[in-house]
Amino acid sequence: MPSRKTPSTEVLLGVLEALPPGQRLWVHGVGGCLHPLLRGGDAVRVLRCGPGALARGDVALLRQGRKLVAHVVVSTRPWRTAPLLGGVDAPAGVTLGRVVAVKRGEWVVPLPRPVRPALWMTQRALAAVWARPGGRVVYRRVRDFFFSGWSRPLRRRLVGPLEVRLLRADDLDALLAFAGERLVVSIGFLRRQLRERWGLDAPARRGAAAGAFDAEGRMRGFAWVDSYRQEALPLDGVWVRSLVVAPQVRRMGVATRLLGCLLDEARRQGEVWVHADVDDDNTASLQTFARLGFRPAPAELTRQANEAWDAAGRAKTLVVLERELGP
């Protein structure tokens, strides 16, 4: 099923900035700064107003460059906002309005002004916990427990069937929403690569990107395969990159299906070998690649990959894998 078409961020910015004060508008593509209250694919209803109409505990919609973000207002004098998890931001960005409701599927959750003290205190408490290394460990362990194997049947029912396929140019908004919440890759890079290189309708198609989509068109998993030369790293061949699956659909075979889709496309494009580099402590990904026939690469290639990433500022040791593609 194709992803649901939503306006681009540039179009939304133009509409929002032209909207008179006091008017309301539903907006997609706000990103993950209010996670877990707001997730990729959710929409927010925005009341157009300036910063003078917001108080501590309100949720502000901000324009930061060409990106939309929703933050909790933690101080008005001086003006400060922050994500729900994390520290206080620098006073940057243009205030577009106040978020008055969040929509997820058919559910609409209002954010009336009487709840703002509770939201502000929640942000402060979560930020204090998140700032501690031990707090992050506890959060991840609790998250892993709820998204482990025992909850898989329930998650399958809640998420519904997933379609895994190669991306097209009109998947851009779904990709950017997923990237804003879960990837550390440049949004500009993803936009350019999808339009010019990976998309099924790209004019100079090479490499590929695959996504897992639910019935609402939201991306739940993503990976791509391409040359590192695209990013000026001195490594030859094609490599699997950014294999990321949302917690809600983990342990449901999504990573395996994404990789299978990419391997089929690499074979179709005439590639003989596909490589992957995985953090040495990422046991789940290492097991997934092993099940698909990937084996440790020669020591020289492993050394080259680690040296290239060390020079780029990466700290972790990488395990380099490879697989030969049959006919």
Image (cartoon, rainbow, N blue to C red):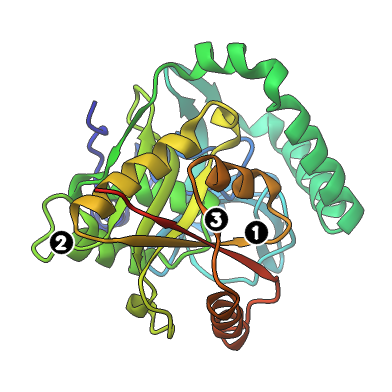
Marking on residue 205: 2
Decide: few, some or many residues near mark 2? Use Cα within 10 Å; few <14, some 14-19, many ≥20: some
Asked whether disc 1 touches disc 3, contact meaning CB atoms under 8 Å apart, the reply is no
User: Label 1 belongs to which residue?
Assistant: 81
Q: Which is in the foreground here, disc 1 or disc 3?
A: 3
Kind of residue at disc 2: Arg
Res. 203 image quadrant: bottom left
- Sequence-wise, which precedes: disc 2 or disc 1? 1
Q: Can residue 30 be seen?
A: no
Residue, x 69% and y 71% (percent of image)?
317
Give the image quarter of residue 6: top left
Q: Nearer the viewer, mark 2 or mark 1?
A: 2
Q: Looking at the image, is mark 3 or mark 2 earlier in the sequence? A: 2
Q: Amino acid at mark 3?
A: Arg
17 with respect to 116 (left or right): left
Disc marking residue 295: 3
**Residue 73 screen position, x and y as percent:** 66, 53
Q: Residue at x 47, y 64 (%)?
A: 185
Question: Label 2 to label 1, Cα distance in Å?
Answer: 41 Å
Q: Residue at x 39, y 25 (%)?
A: 162
Give the side of residue 196 with respect to residue 251, left or right. Answer: left
Give the SS element for disc 1.
strand
| Residue 324 visible within the image | yes
Q: Is residue 307 above or below residue 34?
A: below
